[in-house]
Structures are given as C-alpha cells and as structure tokens.
Amino acid sequence: MSQYTLPDMPYDYAALEPAITGEILELHHSKHHAAYVKGANDTLDRLAEVRDKGDFSGLVGLEKTYAFNLSGHVLHTIFWQNLSPDGGDRPDGELGDSIVEHFGSFEAFQKQLTTATATVQGSGWGVLAWEPLGRRLIVEQVYDHHGNVGMSSTPLLVFDAWEHAYYLQYKNVRPDYVEKLWSLINWNDVIARFDAARA
Ligand code: MN
C-alpha cells in the first residue's frame, strides 16, 4: 500500500516558459519528484520489514532516507503550487504587512531569500517559513531537503536550488534562475499557507 502519491501539476509543463522550460519541468516533476514519492513509500515498506523481523540494525540509514524523501516530496508539492504563469508582483494585506514587520521591507526580505537560495552550498532550498513559537516569518537556508531547519517552522514559499531545477537552461548561473522565480510566485497560494499556518 502506497502512503504517498505524486500530485498532478497545477498547470502544463510548458506553462512557465520562458522562465522555466517545459523540458525542465517535465523531468523535475515526472522523474525527480516521482523518485522522492517512491523513495518515501519504499522506505516505509522497509521500516515495516524491520519491525516484523525485529532487526533494527539498519534503522539509522532508513530514518535518514525517509526524512530525505518525505521532505523532498513535501517541498516539491509546495513548490509547484507556489508558482503560476500568472504570478509575480508582491503581496499586500496581512502577509505584506508581516513581511515588512519581520524583515524591515519587502526589498530586504527579497534580498535575504534570494541570497539564501543562490548561496546554498551544493543542493538545497531557500524557504520563507512561519515560525509559530516566535509567531514570526523567517527565511531558512535548507540543505538537501531537510537540513538546517528549525523543527517548528512551516514552509510557505520555497525556492528549489538543486541543479536539476535550472541547470539545463541556466547552466551554472543560479542567480539568474532565482531572479526569474520572483516573476512566477503565486502570492494567493503563499497567503493561503500563511493564513493556515497562523490559524
Ligand atoms: Mn527539485
């Protein structure tokens, strides 16, 4: 029984062109995201076997593999919904106010998230998250899919900084790809996540 399934894309693979090519989006969703879904399901099966056999000697590796694949599945699911062919601009309302409150200005927030995404060493993500203990917005620089993360935070807006997200189009120039992402942001989706996280 599979616990996780690959969600359909909310738009066609070519819908984000020219910012992101259809070739990249098809590979990214149908191969990379699909692999994280399969990896999470396979690891749950392996964990069930471990419990059945009562042999927990391989548990450390399985826990790491599960966290990696589950987090990859979660982040990609959010990433597709965060983007839209009709995206861009900036949010107003409570999210816009909260960004100014916690980062000083929209421009300062934009610079921090852009830099967090562009400077990930190796593979990772730049993330705008809601941190419920401090009741504040934060930017996190995530390694792989799950490192460098505060346990409490809820991701609202995620920027994929893995080479598979841009290399076929932008080669080594990750900052140009990150710049284009800002023109694709579906702020209505981010606002819905912001409202849900604070509720
Ligand atoms: Mn990715």
Image (tube, helix red, strand yellow):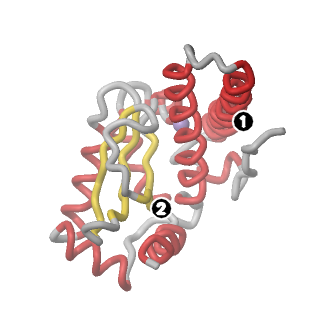
How packed mark 1 is, by other alpha carbons closer than 10 Å (few <14, some 14-19, many 20 or more), is some
Q: Amino acid at mark 1?
A: Ser
The residue beneath circle 2 is 185
| Picture quadrant where residue 43 is located | top right
Q: How many marks?
A: 2
As drawn, the label of residue 123 is none
Disc 2 element = loop
Q: Amino acid at mark 2?
A: Ile
The residue beneath circle 1 is 30
Q: Residue at x 58, y 61 (%)?
A: 84
Confirm whether residue 34 shows in the render.
no
Return the x and y of residue 55 as percentages of the image width and height. Answer: 63, 16
| Picture quadrant where residue 107 is located | bottom left
Residue furthest to the left: 104
Q: In the rendered view, would you say 100 is above or below 151?
A: below
How packed mark 2 is, by other alpha carbons closer than 10 Å (few <14, some 14-19, many 20 or more), is many
